[in-house]
Amino acid sequence: METKEAISALGALAQEHRLAAFRLLVRAGKDGVAAGELARQLSIPHNTMSSHLTTLSQAGLITSQREGRSIIYRIVPEAMRDLLGFLADDCCQGQPELCGLPARSATADKKGCC
């Protein structure tokens, strides 16, 4: 992940409702959550939720797919892994395991969500 991409992702997450929505989507996993359900769970007006979801989408953190009358939002696992990796790359002078973080490898990147 490049610095500009990381700044975009971090900026998108640096807002209470967007971070809460992203965390709900992380918990939902591959099933995702409908926009209206996100708005309901977070007690946010639908138009405001739509704006937040657009910001997260433009940062590459989530995707959307129309399913019938609903738009289902899901996280982009690779984007989340890349952001976490970007943040940990220089941890403990390039030895993230010293900080209690797993070392990144091609094998680790292919596992589940994060």
Image (cartoon, rainbow, N blue to C red):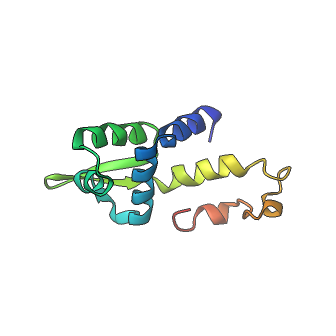
Side (left or right) of 99 relative to 69: right
Looking at the rendering, which quadrant does residue 50 occupy? top left
Percent x, y of residue 109: 61, 61
Q: Is residue 57 left or right of residue 7?
A: left
**Which residue ends up furthest to the left in the rendered image?**
69
Q: Nearer the viewer, residue 51 or 60?
A: 51
Q: Residue at x 62, y 52 (%)?
A: 84
Q: Is residue 11 above or below residue 100?
A: above
Instruction: Pick whichever, 21 or 65, lies toward us.
Output: 21
The residue lying at 40 percent from left, 59 percent from top is 24
- Name the residue located 14 percent from the left edge and 55 percent from the top edge: 68
Residue 103 or 110: which is nearer the viewer? 103
Identify the residue shown where x is 24% and y is 43%.
45
| Residue 12 percent location from the top left of the image | 48, 39
In front here: 105 or 33?
A: 33
Rendering coords of residue 100 (x, y %): 76, 65
x then y, percent, for residue 105: 70, 61
Q: How many marks?
A: 0
Rendered view: 17 above or below 106:
above
Quarter of the figure that contains the C terminus: bottom right
Image quadrant containing the N terminus: top right
Farthest-out residue, right: 93
In this view, which residue lies farthest toward the front? 43
